[in-house]
Image (cartoon, rainbow, N blue to C red):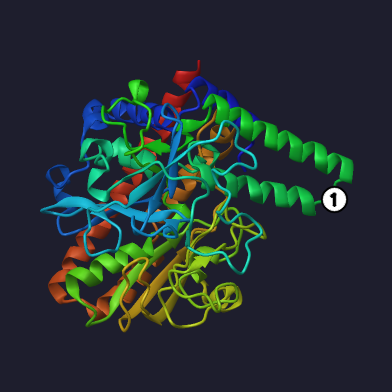
Amino acid sequence: VVDFFDFLPLMFHFDFSWPNLVYAMFQNCSSNYGDPGFVDRVASSENKIPQLKGTDLHLHTSLVPNMRDKEANTITYMTKDLSTSGASYTVPLPQDWVVKDDMDGWYNGGEDQDIFPGGLIFPASDSFVGSDAYKNFPVFPPKSTDGVFTTPAGNMTGQVKSEGMVPPFGGTPTTIQIATASSSTVGYLSEELPSYFAQYFSVLLFGIEEGGMSSDKKLKVQAMLHEFQNLVWKKGLLANMATCSAWTDPDPKDMPECKEDNAWFIDGGFTDGPSTALTLSSYQKANGIDGKVKLILTNENNLSNNMNNIIQYFETSWNGGISPGGFVWAPGAGDSPQAGPWQSQQIFEEYQDEETIMAALQPIEGTSLTMAVLNATTIDNPAFGVQAGQKVSVALLNINSEVPTFLVYDKIIKAYTPALVELVETIAGSQDLQDRLRAFLEPSIKEETTTVLDQSTSLGRKLSFHVGFCVLIFLRGIFSLLV
């Protein structure tokens, strides 16, 4: 859906910085909506709106496993154990910024919710392709020996302990900082993330190798990609396509460069798109595993009708034999692989595949949505902190819309705005959707909670229209920025 050559002028306007782009979007949206101070507001429990009292907000992002300090010419490899050479992570790690009524902080499924891994420091090479920067890290296609941990190549020059890592975003992120960190959807283009940068390009190179080009053309295109990698590595051109935790001031225009003790974040979709595993883990830690949990899970599936975002939580054809939390290079939309590997998100013992889920989906009258109810039982997944033995019922809502989530440049905005407005209105006004969700929830909730559900449903309609209006205001803001 996104045409790179249409997207390029917009990113050039914002100095190829995802933080600059997202800040400008929210600044225009919030100012036109009458709340210009929104861009400076921290995402803290004190700033939670009253309507969300009793609701824990999980803002899901992904912590990259290694990062370059360009000025020092070093790479910090995140590691599970500083005393062991073979414990450096090969995959991004799930991280949630959690806002509750009385606290806020980072959560990664571990016992200490605020701890970030320490790292081993190695010298960086002058050029990228074929260098030690990613030499011992898995690339596509994966091998049977690939795993979540590896030993970086070269000679270690230092280390940074977990407690020595600088708190991201000055301690408490603003709403814009965490929104940016959780949505850095093209973060794999940042050359400051050595192994993930290499892994993404290995997928492209494999596609070229397996494609229908002649041998000569393959070699030329592959050489061009290698030249591009070396160029951006040398110049640091695309560093801020990911989000650096050294960003402290609300406005990212003067954001400092990341150092050896800073972290980098990319889109939460690179560890768990629907963000279910850590959310369930957090619930279990607070409430135990007795009783049945009910989840309402939405799946924005406009790129393909496949269910990989959902079946990843179950045993399925492509994760069989892989331990929950183990290394997997999962399929993405359609037949393409994900941009990089991750830890298996399997949290349920039951088997599901595309056919079984598609067969369970039923249409929601008057909308493009379809809904299925899936019953499951949790299993242990140490990577996300999920505990075995809890009964879970999932109400899956497939959006089934042509509207992409990437509405960020003129051509695509004009093409999809009418469909977006229609989507918001039909979902917000669907009585059939309300009835089905009420039927899903009510058998297990108390009568007084049912009243709250009725009120929140009415509020939900108002909020849906407000969100839709804000999107339209944001689109107008983007037009004004580019004029």
Mark 1: secondary structure: loop
Number of marks: 1
Image coordinates for residue 298, horizontal then vertical, percent: 43, 61
Image coordinates for residue 332, horizontal then vertical, percent: 59, 58
Could you tell me which residue is drawn at 31 percent across and 42 percent down? 178
Image coordinates for residue 119, horizontal then vertical, percent: 36, 48
Residue that numbered label 1 is attached to: 212
Which sits in the foreground, 14 or 158? 158
Q: Decide if residue 273 is in sight here.
A: no
Quick check: 161 above or below 335?
above
Counting other residues with Cα less than 10 Å from the Cα at mark 1, is it few (<14), some (14-19), or many (20 or more)?
A: few
- Image quadrant holding the N terminus, namely top right
Which sits in the foreground, 35 or 10? 10
Side of 389 relative to 309 (left or right):
left
Q: Decide if residue 185 is in sight here.
A: yes
Which sits in the foreground, 209 or 378? 209
Could you tell me which residue is drawn at 54 percent across and 53 percent down? 401
Residue kind at label 1, given as amino acid type: Gly
Quick check: 371 above or below 34?
below
Could you tell me which residue is drawn at 51 percent across and 78 percent down? 315
Can you name the residue that lies furthest to the top here?
Answer: 483
Side of 471 relative to 218 (left or right):
left
Side of 474 relative to 161 (left or right):
right
